[in-house]
Image: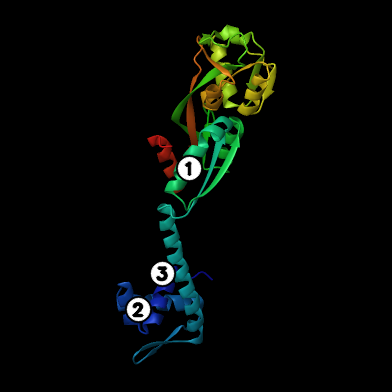
Amino acid sequence: MDMNRNHLAIFRAVAEAGSVSGGAARLGITQPSASVQIAELEREVGTKLLDRVARGVVLTDAGRLLLGFAQRIGELEKQAAAALEEHKGLARGRLAIGASTTIGIYLLPELLGSFRRAHLAVALEVFIDNTSIVERRLEDETLDLALTEGPCVAATLAQEIFAQDRLLLIVPPGHKFAGRAHVTARQVAAEPLIMREPGSGTRVVMEQAFARAGLTLSPTMALSSSEAIKRAVMAGLGVAVISALTVQQETAQKSLAVLAVKDVNLARPLYALHRRGRSLSPAASAFMQLLRTGKK
């Protein structure tokens, strides 16, 4: 049995007012219209719900039973409307955000701190992995937003630049390049090279930049985090090209020497991704606004 929700609301108003005229006035409709729709509801349920008396109406046993459900349905509708208003105003909500490794470790915590201070009631879920895996998680709708270092090629995802980064060469302090301001791409390619794993946005940007200079890179070692790469370089296992975001502390402490690679373009944009053609949740929209205004 399917009950018309409008009929149910009119029945509730009439039952609570004790008369058809009182229920109709509460809802802003005419008394004849209310009477017709109550009659239609009684046909729908196949039983009498109200008895007309001199001073109004009284509920039948079936009417009293249905009124309890109608009141609960009405209360649930109010709660749903209130929850949606809270959701729009970010008095509640959830944001699942993914980030590629460099962004997730060195940039995202500060962004999340700013977001949390503005929206305390929003539950945050964070996933950090390399760019290709984060993009897949966004495509399968596990995530609401993703921040990555490499441009996205998936047709199902839209991208927007939110910041700029650059890649730098790092060498141990005693290395022959230490103390120089820059080296050439060919000099870098000739060194034992430590790189990020395949699928990393940093690796993709680096390989593409060197390929444009006619150079193919053959790393001696691939590691899955910038921290591991820095430790390997400090240990004298090779040189590496990594994000400027990752070496601020080491530069200050002089535990690594940092150089520019002068004849390739190692500047790169950082991207915010979301599913194309899908509306952003209020929480995701608020986070995108945070990115666009550059607040951290």
Q: Residues within 10 Å of mark 3 (few under 14, many from 20)?
A: few
Asked which secondary structure carries label 3, the reply is helix
Mark 1, mark 2: which one is toward the viewer? 1
For marks 3 and 2 on the same chain, the one whose residue lies earlier in the sequence: 3
Q: What x and y, as percent, mark residue 95?
A: 51, 46
Spatial distance from mark 1 to mark 2, Cα to Cα?
51 Å
Spatial distance from mark 3 to mark 2, Cα to Cα?
13 Å
At 53% from the left and 32% from the top, the residue drawn is 106
Q: Which residue is mark 2?
A: 23
Spatial distance from mark 1 to mark 3, Cα to Cα?
46 Å
Question: In the image, what residue type sits under mark 1?
Answer: Gly
Viewer-proximal residue, 240 or 40? Answer: 240
Q: What x and y, as percent, mark residue 239?
A: 63, 16
Question: In the image, what residue type sits under mark 3?
Answer: Asn
Q: Is residue 259 visible?
A: yes
Indicate which disc residue 6 carries: 3
Asked which secondary structure carries label 1, the reply is helix
Mark 3, mark 2: which one is toward the viewer? 2
* Quadrant of image for the C terminus: top left
Indicate which disc residue 113 carries: 1
